[in-house]
Image (cartoon, rainbow, N blue to C red):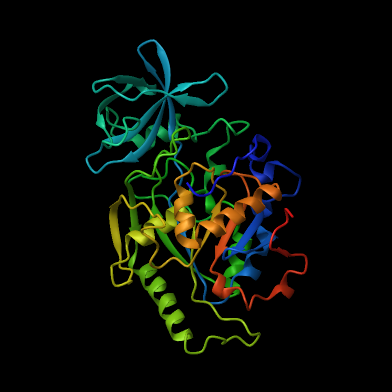
Amino acid sequence: MTTAVEVPDELLARLPVEQRGLGLDRDGVRLLVSYGAEEVSHHAFVELPGLLRAGDLLVVNTSSTLAAAVDGRLGHARVVVHFSTRGEDGRWAVELRDPDGRGTTRARAGGPAGTEVLLPDDVRLVLEEPFTTRSPRLWWARVSEPDVPGLLRRHGRPIRYSYTERDQPLSVYQSVFALPSADGSGSAEMPSAARPFTPRLVAELVSRGVQFAPVTLHTGVASAEAHEPPYPERFAVPEASARLINAARAEQTRGEALPWKGGDGRREGGRVIAVGTTAVRAVESAVGPDGVVRAAEGWTDLVVTPERGVRVTDGLLTGLHEPEASHLLMLEAIAGPAAIRHSYDEALCGRYLWHEFGDMHLVLPSEMSEGRQRSENPHTEHCVSNCR
């Protein structure tokens, strides 16, 4: 990993922002914006509409978060089952974890085949085979209750990791874009990049001409310990969203002949900005070798790296990721390693907060930064480095 930072414990967001101070809403987090390898700026997230332009397209993930953690018993031992991904044959990919006595869990060895876990309502879960050959952590399991989403609604809770302070209701883990799926599928872990959006902020973005392209990618269980690459996940890019993305890309091409079209000297829209790494994975899984995005659905095992690159994603709005996280390779594919290193140095210097309840990072292409309208945000701080 080229981005080497160590995140101190005090910079781990332990509570949602709306629980950290009176009068705060979800959009009360901070926003670090990076333009290429040299320049960053510091904002409040509510300033996002002033950083985007008419014609920009935000690709958002509509997957809803499941109450995916369920208590069970393995013989006489207590275990916690994390339901990760629903298979086409009715099985579920699951991870068994041990309670740690603090309301969270710790990793345990997966398998072996035939392991049986007793769940609430006398539901039985039997491990059958590893989910992939890469790691025995996740296993395909057969569940005696066919309505697993119903089981999760009755007895599940959101997956919680040890850096958080306490359990939260499921509503805390849903974004404003979340839509229930017909078969009850969803994300084992929140697509957290969209969490700071509020209905008020979305309305302001729309009023300024920013467009939204919904896609779906159901995120599976991440490994908090191993930072493994993402597993195969279910995704869907609808026809309407494919058309919006292709139209934005075509607008960029047309704009090359007239690079400065705005009355205020700014290049107008056409940037495709993914809200979260899940949105990148979905849209980049639907683009062909010709650069055209087409409606698609199914499973994707795509891992976006600097070597693979991106074909349609111009920018990314995401949280701050740990130095071992495979998601950083995706950020480097979009912005380059130097830009991400510089941004993360600034985030540490500026005491930004990490993880799903933390602050946000907007990666924009450097070629678009010359015409930014800084007067819209008089308190914005632009710098080459705050650490010098």
Vertical relation: 81 (above or below) 54: above
Q: Residue 324: tell me if it is visible.
A: yes
**Looking at the rendering, in which quadrant would you find the C terminus?**
bottom right
- Residue at 37 percent of width and 50 percent of height: 181
Q: Nearer the viewer, residue 325 or 123?
A: 325
- Residue at 48 percent of width and 56 percent of height: 332
210 left or right, relative to 279 = right
Q: Residue 175: tell me if it is visible.
A: no
Q: Quadrant of residue 130?
A: top left
95 left or right, relative to 266 = left
Q: Nearer the viewer, residue 113 or 227?
A: 227
Q: Nearer the viewer, residue 174 or 78?
A: 78
Q: Quadrant of residue 377?
A: bottom right
251 left or right, relative to 357 = left
Q: Position of residue 144 (x, y in %)?
A: 27, 27
- Residue at 54 percent of width and 46 percent of height: 321
Q: Position of residue 202 (x, y in %)?
A: 58, 64
Vertical relation: 152 (above or below) 241: above
